[in-house]
Image (cartoon, rainbow, N blue to C red):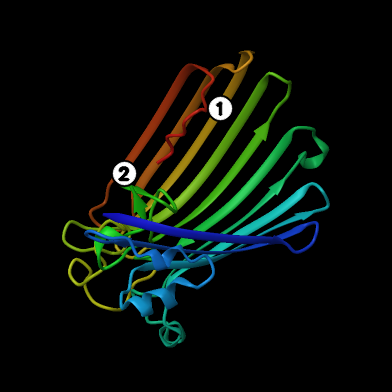
Amino acid sequence: KKYAAIHHLDMNVTKWLNIGLFEGVIFGRTNRFDFGYLNPIIFYRSIEQQNGSFDNSIVGLDAKANIAKKFQVYGQFSLDEFKLSEIKKNRGWWANKWGIQLGAKYIDAFGINNLDLQIEHNRVRPFTYSHFDSVANYTHYNQPLAHPLMANFQEYIGIARYQPAPKWMVVAKLMYYQQGRDSSSRSFGSNIFLPNVDPPRQGEFGYKIGSGWKTNVVYGSVLVSYEIKENLFIDLSAVVRNLKTITPPIMQEKTSVITFGVRWNMYRREFVF
């Protein structure tokens, strides 16, 4: 069986600044649960050492700052595993595993009511969230818990939301990401469902973001939504997606989709990835 224990502690340092700490562990056991992980105070690494096991532990830091009532900057940093000496040597050691997110929001942008802008950058090293025991990877029901792209990627996102009238909503998104994908015979750390042992990983060094089958994707979408009556919406959207590989085998895919739908008491699902 697969278990998880996750803690998050945050504090409003000032009226405009919030800082949080995060830790989590995922582990697999045949017939038991480690009740030591239910302790909300002791860091999980100390519990691991006490139990003589090395499960998949992750720690993190997040922060959010509201500036001048119309701006918000936010970010988070997650650390899976690292060795300081290897970071200094800069040899691309596979087990230096971390991820970072930085973003900003601009509310009522340029003095226009109900126009909100958002930019965001995500970057995750190869093999982050993976584990030598594939049962303990950072997933649940075969879905990644952190990011849909899993690992070994860098991503840039821009979003504009505008409500010109109470019943109308327009949302435009533009996204670019680059990912080093795995080959059929070797793991480059993008698929966290694979164990991070050798094989399928090959070698200790030379791993950086984009290593492997380097793939660039540009995605753009526009959504227009109208509320006919309370919680009854009509949606019209257009999506353009362009995928191109940089390293052999070279391939290119272009996709254009127009959709129309009606939803009632339902949140609109996103099918970006």
Give the vertical position of 200 relative to 239 (above or below): below
State how far apart marks 1 and 2 are (Cα): 25 Å
Side of 98 where 103 appears, left or right:
right
Side of 252 where 239 appears, left or right:
right
User: Badge 1 is on which residue?
Assistant: 223
Examine the image and state in which quarter residue 16 appears: bottom right
- Amino acid marked by disc 1: Leu
SS under mark 2: strand
Which residue is depicted at the point 73% across and 21% down?
Answer: 165
**Figure disc tally:** 2
Residue 93 visible to an observer of this rendering: no
Per the rendering, the mark at residue 188 is none
Q: Position of residue 256 (x, y in %)?
A: 41, 29
Q: Dot 1: few (<14), some (14–19), or many (≥20) neighbours within 10 Å? A: some
- Amino acid marked by disc 2: Gln
Per the rendering, the mark at residue 252 is 2
Which residue is depicted at the point 26% across and 54% down?
Answer: 1
SS under mark 1: strand
Side of 185 where 34 appears, left or right:
right
Which residue is depicted at the point 28% across and 78% down?
Answer: 204
Q: Position of residue 171 (x, y in %)?
A: 60, 32
Side of 194 where 266 appears, left or right:
right
Q: Dot 2: few (<14), some (14–19), or many (≥20) neighbours within 10 Å? A: few
Of badges 1 and 2, nearer the viewer stands 1
